[in-house]
């Protein structure tokens, strides 16, 4: 059993934990998005040796962004279970908006996370799903398993949803910034 799981935890503590996870994962989305949405002009200022690595770095960040988005959603769904009636109404609306603006996210993240399931179907080797990355000047879209995620939409929706989750935690909420142990 995990440490801290032996004792029952009250609803408010669980809501606080969900809010913390939503905030942290939304931060991961924000960081990845800030790197993916860099304009061509800003990227051209990098030294030549760094420019060679940018494409691989962007692609790895895009994949990480998909995982982070899924975990923002998970934290919000957890918070919904522990919300009071008034809070739950707002959070359900935010969850609905998130799912409408990022359709297929759960499936796309599942394809990325469980790629091994897509390489051998019924004992026969199968073509691996497609992952594509479309970069424009200040835009970025990642596609996995046929689902497209626009990074600009992703950052807006993760901010909106995590803010609604934080509202569930109420007065007990504090930002978990600077709590790293050295």
Image (cartoon, helix red, strand yellow):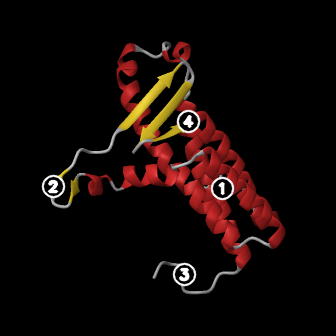
Q: Is residue 178 in sight in this rendering?
A: no
The part of the image, by quadrant, that contains residue 42 is top right
Nearer to us: label 3 or label 2: 2
Under circle 3, the secondary element is loop
Q: Which of marks 4 and 1 is nearer the N terminus?
A: 4
Q: Is residue 55 above or below residue 150?
A: above
Residue assigned mark 3: 5
- Residue 35 placement, left or right of 121: right
Residue occupying image coordinates x 42% and y 15%? 47
- Could you say which is closer to the camera, residue 45 or residue 130? 130
Residue occupying image coordinates x 54% and y 12%? 41
Q: Position of residue 114 (x, y in %)?
A: 34, 56
Residue occupying image coordinates x 72% and y 61%? 92
The span from disc 3 to disc 2 (Cα, nearest Å) is 42 Å
Residue 150: mark: 4
The span from disc 1 to disc 2 (Cα, nearest Å) is 47 Å
Residue occupying image coordinates x 36% and y 31%? 56
């Amino acid at each position: 059993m995990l440490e801290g799981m032996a004792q029952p935890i009250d609803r408010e503590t669980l809501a606080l934990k969900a809010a913390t996870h939503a905030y942290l994962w939304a931060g991961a989305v924000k960081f990845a998005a800030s790197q993916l949405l860099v304009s061509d002009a800003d990227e051209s200022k990098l030294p030549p040796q760094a420019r060679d690595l940018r494409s691989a770095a962007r692609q790895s960040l895009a994949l990480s962004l998909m995982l982070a988005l899924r975990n923002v959603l998970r934290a919000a769904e957890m918070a919904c279970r522990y919300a009071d009636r008034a809070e739950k109404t707002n959070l359900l609306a935010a969850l609905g908006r998130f799912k409408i603006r990022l359709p297929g996210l759960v499936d796309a993240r599942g394809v990325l996370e469980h790629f091994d399931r897509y390489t051998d179907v019924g004992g026969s080797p199968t073509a691996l799903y497609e992952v594509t990355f479309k970069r424009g000047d200040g835009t970025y879209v990642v596609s996995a398993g046929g689902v497209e995620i626009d990074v600009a939409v992703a950052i807006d929706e993760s901010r909106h949803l995590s803010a609604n989750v934080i509202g569930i935690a109420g007065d007990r909420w504090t930002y978990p910034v600077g709590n790293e142990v050295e």
